[in-house]
Image: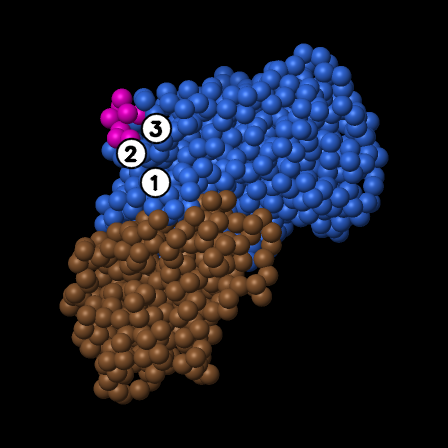
């Protein structure tokens, strides 16, 4: 150890290691961990080792979960669920409170253990991960307490299978378990294979507080164990991890009826405008991509800087990079610790090498890396072409890309030029500019002049291929609750489509003028691409012809819908006016529509038209009232939860109730600002095609509603596969629902599959439709001067 | 051990000031929540322990302007303070730390106490700093304020801590502020001038940045946060903004400017916190008394107790240490 005199010459920080003796003693005493099932640890069968990435030292052996282990855990959770779900909210709140308290009381134990197992700096596990985990349990103790009052009629989903990643092991456990338990569910949670230890410590805490057995079950293992959990008899899967695995889970759960939430990867933009506090933004980069070794799904990994300040910003960023301390995660002065595992380190190295090979210039900290252990010097790329692999791929390491932009429009175009949509960070002292970009950026979480700010009271989750569902806040609670399921109503199967002429008896009277129902695309009537029509039959008689739509019609309709983006920017009041006007114009033609439905053999024809008019009034009323919330999170932060339209939605309508079924799905979607490509009732599409003229006279902008008639499930498949469709509703049979869910995996669009219902009754409308037609964006705005 | 004031990097060239450059600061963006966040995490990101902690506390002493600025100051009181500045730590602590020589960066007093301080510090090499220019409010005619500088210099002051007219900042009257400080700098002559911005009166961090920049352009050798008499004195967010202004000025001109937080810092923990700020935002040269001073009075007592504990392993009582 150098003397005081020597240190006075260097003014170094010196080592400041956090003691790990208590935790190491615990690991030594346990040695090998079984699963935590039904309130007790199982005898471990096959095991694998979990190591400290900073040293390679094996910390413990944990059980490799088999299909049988998973089944036993699910069985225990299943057995425990009714009792747990029947407890009063207050009783469950007491348990959650106990868990929160115990996490706090074990805060340093958990922080040290997390750092050992994961490699993250002790500052982060101590000041961020563990306090946020405790906060999550406190917050959800509150939701449990208020559940009946705040979510009347809702019930627990049941048994939840939860699969979490290795980047924030305990925190992600808290994000999963706290809301699930608050809502009355029981869980089987699988921690990541690299980082199972804090979950096992949490299991001991569950046992310590005396949580009823089977409510929380922890099964350790790798991807195979995870796949077994996805396949198990659970009611919901909640997954946080890579987009690749998320896609596989989407496919695997398609048609099973399992609820699904996915929190996946990202390549989040970090936009620095010329009028920003550049020092604040530089520090933001430290908290974004150099936080947790860059192993953060919402990390601001694409830095976009306005050209006017790019040179200054880059110089300051480089200077700041030079101050980072990389090394022993247990040292209290470490900024960047160890990468979680050699496999991940190799992956980062490969991607970075490819990025360099493709022409990007790497600027790396000159930090002296420890001789052994999984370390990667933090840095950033410049000269990155948009097609460079590091522009697109999530590196999941401490390396960002830095590119420049000229104008706010260009910044937005670059920011949204990604398949992901998890988070965005916007730096500007101009509140008009910052909020404008916040509104337009495609991301579930937007931080203005800040980054990586989290709180249990706000929702977190992505747009696009960053997944769906939210964690935290009211919107997060909803994901663990089931609304009462409307009674399914059988519908007559659609008849096979026949493009051949249908000869009828010669007419005795004067010839009626032929009516033509085309496709409705971009506000204009278009002939079907196929050039075929099919007969719409009623009571054995052809009542008209409808275009036989194909995939190209869907393509054209989606393009038209994409162009109608102005609809989403219109005020709720504007949209309400259009919907009211639609009701007015339909009312003027009530008799005609009733006659048409009667002709088609619809039994309650007059009711259906009257119901349609009422529905238009209802969603006109909602258009400017379904608004968001201001979450109570951190002090001096406004956290806005804004329901936003998806953009372009595909809607496959029921065969039943050809008019009312159609409007019951299309109107809530457009009331929220979506543009729709709808496939109307296959057997009676004329009820929908008759609406063209009503749309045209009601000032509905072209492209907001597009209608393609024809084989519903074929057209639905094309919609589900379409990468430029953000959400898809499908009302039809089980096989169609499975198909839509499976095909949606391509761009991970949000799907809602629903069975036909009584569209005349209360199940035919409501706020639930609006919730399904929107995604929540949380915007964080710290304030203070 | 070399605890001289010139141990580390020094100003090779003294700041000569430059003509007023409004475009260097008029549109400056300072985001307050972000500055507060950075300030709050500075001390959670860095830690000094054991020998290192001891060394950093010793360094705080050699960067300290040991201060008394009270209405009831007497020459005897000042002499006592000067004795402490000459011998800031008890002998057993010095011995335990392996130090043979240590003194504070300066002693800071009112102008009428400068003579007593200069006599008491004679031969020690410890500079006498005097507040002047109508300390603390500065609301006196400029000629009297300049005369006060000359008086203090005449009494033997080596350094002058001036106060600015806050109204010039609040009114955005940058040329008036510039001219006032430039005149003071001229009056200081060879004596180093520290410009006290009284940041607690300026309120916003943008104002703090702007006032810092004007003071440096007008020739300040140091910029200093507070008189100790404002409602809010030295804080880390304010200090952060000042050292960033100082960095920017250095970047533009090549001059190194010193920083002196003052007021409200009472603990050894504070001493470490501000040194972390200097090291992280600027670098090691700003851990030497040539470019960094801590304006404090009671902080030394806490540091001495901590160092006593470091040396003996026993918690110390202030009654066993010499009063400042």
* Image quarter hosting the C terminus of chain A: bottom left
Residue sitting at x 76%, y 23%: A41
Judged from this view, the residue extending furthest toward the top is: A46
In the image, which disc is placed on residue A458?
Answer: none
Whether residues under marks 2 and 1 lie with C-beta atoms below 8 angstroms apart, the answer is yes
Query: How busy is the neighbourhood of tag 1: few (under 14 within 10 Å), some, or many (20 plus)?
Result: many
Q: Are marks 3 and 2 on the same chain?
A: yes
Q: Are marks 2 and 1 on the same chain?
A: yes
Q: Secondary structure at mark 3?
A: helix
Q: Are marks 3 and 1 on the same chain?
A: yes
Q: CA distance from mark 3 to mark 1?
A: 19 Å
Span colored in magenta: A355-363
A692, A351: nearer the viewer: A351
Q: Secondary structure at mark 2?
A: strand
* Residue at numbered disc 3: A390
* Residue at numbered disc 2: A363
In the image, which disc is placed on residue A321?
Answer: 1
B20, B187: nearer the viewer: B187
């Amino acid at each position: 150890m150098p003397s005081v005199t020597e240190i006075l010459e260097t003014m170094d920080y010196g080592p400041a290691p956090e003691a790990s003796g208590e935790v190491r003693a615990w690991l030594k005493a346990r040695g090998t961990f079984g699963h935590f099932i039904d309130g007790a640890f199982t005898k471990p069968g096959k095991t694998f080792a979990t190591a400290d990435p900073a040293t390679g030292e094996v910390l413990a052996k944990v059980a490799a979960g088999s299909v049988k282990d998973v089944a036993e855990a699910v069985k225990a959770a299943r057995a425990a669920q009714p009792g747990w779900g029947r407890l009063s909210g207050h009783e469950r709140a007491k348990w959650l409170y106990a868990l929160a308290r115990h996490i706090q009381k074990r805060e340093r134990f958990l922080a040290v253990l997390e750092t050992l197992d994961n490699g993250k700096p002790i500052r982060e596990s101590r000041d961020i991960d563990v306090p946020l985990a405790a906060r999550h349990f406190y917050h959800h103790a509150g939701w449990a307490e208020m559940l009946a009052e705040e979510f009347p009629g809702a019930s627990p989903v049941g048994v939840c299978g939860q699969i979490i990643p290795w980047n924030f092991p305990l925190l992600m456990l808290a994000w999963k378990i706290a809301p699930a338990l608050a809502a009355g569910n029981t869980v089987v949670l699988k921690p990541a294979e690299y980082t199972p230890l804090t979950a096992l410590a949490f299991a001991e805490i569950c046992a310590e507080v005396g949580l009823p057995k089977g409510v929380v079950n922890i099964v350790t293992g790798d991807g195979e164990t995870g796949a077994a959990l996805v396949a198990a008899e659970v009611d919901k899967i909640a997954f946080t991890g890579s987009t690749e695995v998320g896609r596989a889970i989407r496919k695997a759960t398609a048609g099973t009826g399992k609820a699904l939430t996915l929190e996946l990867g990202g390549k989040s933009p970090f936009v620095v405008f010329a009028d920003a506090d550049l020092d604040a933004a530089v520090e933001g980069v430290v908290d974004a991509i150099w936080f947790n070794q860059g192993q953060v799904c919402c990390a601001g990994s694409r830095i976009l800087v306005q050209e006017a300040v790019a040179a200054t910003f880059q110089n300051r960023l480089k200077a700041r990079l030079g101050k980072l301390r990389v090394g022993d995660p247990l040292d209290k002065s470490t900024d960047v610790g160890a990468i979680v595992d050699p496999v991940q380190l190799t992956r980062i190295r490969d991607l970075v090498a490819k990025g360099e090979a493709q022409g990007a210039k790497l600027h790396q900290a000159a930090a002296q890396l420890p001789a052994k252990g999984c370390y990667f010097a933090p840095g950033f790329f410049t000269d990155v072409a948009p097609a460079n692999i590091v522009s697109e791929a999530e590196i999941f390491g401490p390396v960002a890309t830095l590119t420049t932009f000229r104008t706010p429009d260009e910044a937005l175009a670059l920011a949204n030029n990604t398949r992901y949509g998890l988070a965005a960070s916007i730096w500007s002292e101009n509140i008009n500019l910052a909020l404008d970009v916040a509104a337009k950026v495609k991301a579930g979480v937007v931080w203005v002049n800040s980054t990586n700010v989290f709180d249990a009271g706000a929702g977190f989750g992505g747009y696009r291929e960053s997944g769906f569902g939210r964690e935290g806040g009211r919107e997060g609670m909803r994901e663990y609750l089931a609304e009462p399921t409307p009674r399914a109503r059988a519908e007559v199967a659609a008849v096979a489509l026949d493009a051949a002429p249908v000869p009828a008896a010669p007419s005795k009277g004067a010839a009626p003028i032929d009516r033509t129902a085309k496709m409705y695309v971009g506000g204009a009537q278009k002939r079907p691409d196929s050039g075929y029509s099919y007969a719409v039959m009623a009571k054995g008689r052809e009542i008209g012809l409808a275009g036989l739509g194909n995939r190209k019609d869907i393509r054209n309709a989606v393009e038209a819908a994409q162009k109608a983006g102005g609809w989403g920017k219109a005020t709720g009041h504007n949209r309400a006016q259009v919907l009211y006007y639609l009701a007015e114009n339909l009312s003027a033609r009530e008799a005609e529509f009733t006659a048409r439905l009667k002709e088609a053999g619809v039994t309650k024809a007059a009711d259906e038209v009257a119901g349609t008019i009422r529905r238009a009034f209802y969603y006109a009323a909602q258009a400017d009232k379904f608004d968001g919330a201001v979450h109570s999170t951190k002090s001096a932060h406004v956290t806005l939860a804004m329901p936003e339209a998806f953009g372009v939605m595909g809607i496959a309508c029921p065969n039943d109730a050809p008019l009312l079924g159609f409007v019951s799905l299309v109107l809530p979607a457009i009331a929220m600002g979506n543009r729709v490509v709808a496939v109307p009732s296959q057997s009676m599409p004329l009820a929908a095609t008759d609406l063209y003229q009503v749309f045209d006279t009601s000032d509905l902008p072209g492209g907001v509603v597009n209608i393609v008639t024809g084989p519903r499930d074929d057209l639905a498949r094309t919609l589900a596969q379409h990468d430029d469709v953000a959400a898809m509703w499908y009302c039809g049979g089980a096989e169609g629902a499975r198909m839509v869910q499976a095909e949606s995996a391509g761009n991970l669009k949000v799907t809602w599959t629903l069975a036909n219902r009584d569209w005349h009754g209360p199940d035919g409308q409501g706020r639930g439709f609006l919730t399904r037609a929107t995604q929540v964006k949380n915007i964080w705005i710290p304030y203070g001067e | 051990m070399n605890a001289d004031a010139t141990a580390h990097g020094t100003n090779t060239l003294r700041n000569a000031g430059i003509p007023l450059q409004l475009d260097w600061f008029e549109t400056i963006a300072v985001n307050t929540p972000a500055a507060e966040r950075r300030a709050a995490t500075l001390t959670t990101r860095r830690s000094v322990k054991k020998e290192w902690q001891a060394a950093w506390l010793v360094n705080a002493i050699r960067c300290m302007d040991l201060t008394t600025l009270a209405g009831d100051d007497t020459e005897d009181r000042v002499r006592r303070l000067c004795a402490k500045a000459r011998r800031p730590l008890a002998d057993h602590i010095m011995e335990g730390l392996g130090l043979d020589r240590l003194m504070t960066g300066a002693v800071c007093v009112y102008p009428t106490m400068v003579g007593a301080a200069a006599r008491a510090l004679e031969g020690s090499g410890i500079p006498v700093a005097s507040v002047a220019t109508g300390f603390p409010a500065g609301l006196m005619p400029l000629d009297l304020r300049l005369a006060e500088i000359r008086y203090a210099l005449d009494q033997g002051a080596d350094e002058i801590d001036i106060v600015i007219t806050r109204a010039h900042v609040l009114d955005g009257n940058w040329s008036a502020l510039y001219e006032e400080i430039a005149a003071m700098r001229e009056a200081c002559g060879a004596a180093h001038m520290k410009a006290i911005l009284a940041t607690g009166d300026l309120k916003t961090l943008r104002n703090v940045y702007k006032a810092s920049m004007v003071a440096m352009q007008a020739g300040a050798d140091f910029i200093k946060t507070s008189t100790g008499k404002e409602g809010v004195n030295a804080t880390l967010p304010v200090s952060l903004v000042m050292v960033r202004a100082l960095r920017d000025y250095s970047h533009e001109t090549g001059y190194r400017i010193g920083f002196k937080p003052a007021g409200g810092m009472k603990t050894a923990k504070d001493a470490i916190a501000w040194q972390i700020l200097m090291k992280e935002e600027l670098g090691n040269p700003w851990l030497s008394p040539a470019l960094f001073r801590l304006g404090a009075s009671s902080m030394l007592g806490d540091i001495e107790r901590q160092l006593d504990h470091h040396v003996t392993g026993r918690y110390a009582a202030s009654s066993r240490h010499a009063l400042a």
